[in-house]
Image: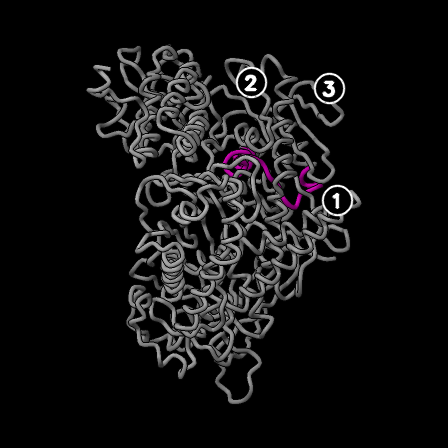
Amino acid sequence: MKFYTNVTIYGDNALVRGVHNGQRFQEKIPFKPQLFVPKKKPGAATYHNMFGEPLESMEFGGINDAREFVKNYEGVSNMKIHGNTNWQYQYITENYGGEIEFDMNQMLIWGLDIETTSEQGFPNVDDPQEEILLITIQDLSSRRIRTWGRKPFDSAYYHQHESEADLLRAFMTYWSQNAPDIITGWNSNLFDIPYLVNRIERVLGSDAAKQLSPWRQIRKREINYGEKVLTTFDIVGITHLDYLDLYKKFTYNAQESYKLDYICRQELGVGKLENPFDTFSDFYKNDWKLFTEYNITDTQRVLELEDKMKLIELAATMAFDAKCLIGDVFSAVRTWDCVLYNYLWDQNIVVHPRDTSRPDRSIEGAYVQEPVPGGYDWVVSFDATSLYPSIIMQYNMSPETLVKPDADYHTATTVDQLLAKQTDLDTLQNADECLTANGYHFNRDRKGLFPGIVQKLFDDRQMYKKKMIDAQKLYEETHKASYLNDISRYTNFQMARKIQLNSLFGAWANYYFRYFDDRIAEGITITGQYIIRTVGRALDEYLNKIVGTKDFKYSFYSDTDSCYITLDPLVKKFYADKSKAEIVKILDRICEEKITGIINQACGELAAYTNAFEEKIMFKREAIADRGIWVAKKRYAINVYNNEGVTYTEPKLKVMGLEIVRSSTPEAIRKTLKEAVRVAITTDEATLQEFIGQAKKEFLKLPPEEIAFPRGVNGMRKYSSNTHIYDKGCPMHVRGALLYNHYLKEYQISNKYELIGEGDKIRFLYLRTPNRIKENCIGFIGKLPTEFLLTNMVDYDTMWDKSFIEPLNGIIQGLGWTARPQATLAGLFS
């Protein structure tokens, strides 16, 4: 077993770290890259580009020679240079052929957390004045902990040092002798690593921090973060995977806060250790033992997240599958460029140069049907299986199969014309071409390269899913721990393929992608529109015929790859005397035996009409719900009794786009709103109003921090004023943030509480007036400072109306309901 963990190009060399037969290695290897140019001499060619044009190889004495060659011919139209000029990927492909086997346990993966003083307030990465007090690392595999600190702490893994300089030297010595392959932490990309690098340079000298790199190289990098430009560092030879970034990238639910404590409570059911003192300074001065445990626990929590979520393992799986660097998985464009580069290379096909021109138009997106707001009974949803990848395969969509790609050759058509079959497509079969809904033609004489790789990923995913299920069965039978490793590995293998498949369209629609073509990208989205609208029409026609209704809109809502229908007329006509449980079973059977077949038949007819390369579009039934409420596009809630064939003992509420799932709604309110929507779906208006009255009583008991609105704050520099704190037109949450910072400084407590910075996640509250600060709002981070004397001035009525009543009214207005009982003339005299 041999695999790389990091490859960096330096001069004419590849700096490689990896594992070979269980032994970690580090090598500096001279590398001679290849590039390709159009073949001028007659005769057979070994290499071609994806358009079939013959190429000849050019070999260079080193990377610098290849760079110079590319530079000299830049802009020369008849000398297009083919091949991958990201030299590290050339090296990986040339030296790691076939499937790369890797073992996470053979990699050295560390969690890291540092603590500093806070004498000047929250430590500034770019001006690291605060001393480092503690550094903890923990190894993912062995779970061994090492901590370097400034005061006594009773533990075998703890190393005390009299001065910060001694602490840093000892830490650097251990690090340089045992350099990890991967380092992780929570927000370590924007705090721990850059602060550590800058502080080491300040305390030990400008070159000292280079010892963090096994190659003694550190590269400074800037990150655009909202309106801020932040600094971080790449430690050459070590992959840095900030677990916060992994969490945001590979978990698909937005959180109201991305503080480690909040995420751990959501995912692990336990948070960080709490600071029992008023200030962070008091914490490390008065309880060093607890402060050290606080630091160690933060490190442990991140690795506990990895134990559950396996995001580092997922990143490694995706990287080795694509043959890219592990840190590249944050970029779909870079990952897919490597996937395709290796797939083509195995067929002696060389990637073509990037087109640096940019399109002058945007790509038309997916179809989302506008629903009539209100309640719908007996709702059933159907989803297309991997719609966009399936469209690519069905229409053989690839740059080299696009007919006459250098000319504006396409059929003038629209989705409406295709639906009405008003487009003349007789010539398609004679030309052996298929048609996408934006009018472009693709050859059918051979399978395209893109459909080929998509099919391979589909097949691989199915294979690994089967292996995952087999391992799960074996574990249940034997309870052998080795099967748990197989389950984890195959789960990540299939998940990596799923992510790659789902990210292909996003890469293809990105003009930084080597294979970007807006005709193909838009062909995918508009064909998706055609398919989902075809399905809706077919269902309306079939159900009107079966139920005996005329022009009833059974298919009332569609979104990209999902179609929602109401079967209420069917239930009322044929099954009104049945119980809910019986109706769910009946609808499940009808969907399986009849409706899914009608959908797939319509998709088959559509494929035949457009002379598709092969039929790939398939739908499956997803949810059966007794009732749903639609507010608008992408905003609805349904009460699900059965999902994908699984019947629930108690129905589950599925919510999309409403305030109860938005991270901008306080968590405590989201829970109450969700229950209110459940009440609205399952009961009547009076019961809902009674629930609301009781919910407000509970709301009034909550502390201010639990009812405050979470927001990301941007525009602080734009709206700040030296004379009035904030300028006219300043948004409420930004005003609250500026007021908070102003009064921290005025009351001289900025060393106790963290100042709000551009792009930070904050909370804000409405206040009753008059109050101490003479304003109707205040922002804060974490806790509302007691020194502001505003706790008793929170406007609970306004907070209730804006966080609960207004969103709920938006949800129930389609039902004709109100959140509060309405006075009527009849009621006055009753």
Magenta segment boundaries in residue numbering? 175-198
Indicate the quadrant where residue 306 lies. Answer: top right
CA neighbours of label 3 inside 10 A, class few (<14), some (14 to 19), many (20+) = few
Q: Is residue 601 visible?
A: yes
Mark 3 vs 2, N-terminal side = 3
Judged by depth in the image, the label closer to the viewer, 1 or 3, is 1
Tell me if residue 44 comes above or below residue 649 in the rendering: below
Q: Secondary structure at mark 2?
A: loop
Which x, y percent locates residue 695?
Answer: 41, 20
CA neighbours of label 1 inside 10 A, class few (<14), some (14 to 19), many (20+) = few
- For the point 52% across and 50% down, the residue is 588
CB atoms of marks 2 and 1 within 8 Å: no
Which x, y percent locates residue 348?
Answer: 58, 75
- For the point 63% across and 53% down, the residue is 493
Mark 3: which amino acid? Asp
Q: Which residue is mark 3?
A: 154
Judged by depth in the image, the label closer to the viewer, 2 or 1, is 1
Indicate the quadrant where residue 703 lies. Answer: top left
Tell me if residue 145 comes above or below residue 280 in the rendering: below
Label drawn at residue 476:
1
Does residue 301 belong to the magenta stretch? no
Q: Secondary structure at mark 1?
A: helix
Q: Secondary structure at mark 3?
A: loop
CB atoms of marks 3 and 2 within 8 Å: no
Mark 1: which amino acid? Glu
Tell me if residue 754 comes above or below residue 45 in the rendering: above
Q: Which residue is mark 2?
A: 275
Number of on-image labels: 3
The front one of 421 and 113 is 421
Marks 1 and 3 sit apart, C-alpha to C-alpha, by: 42 Å
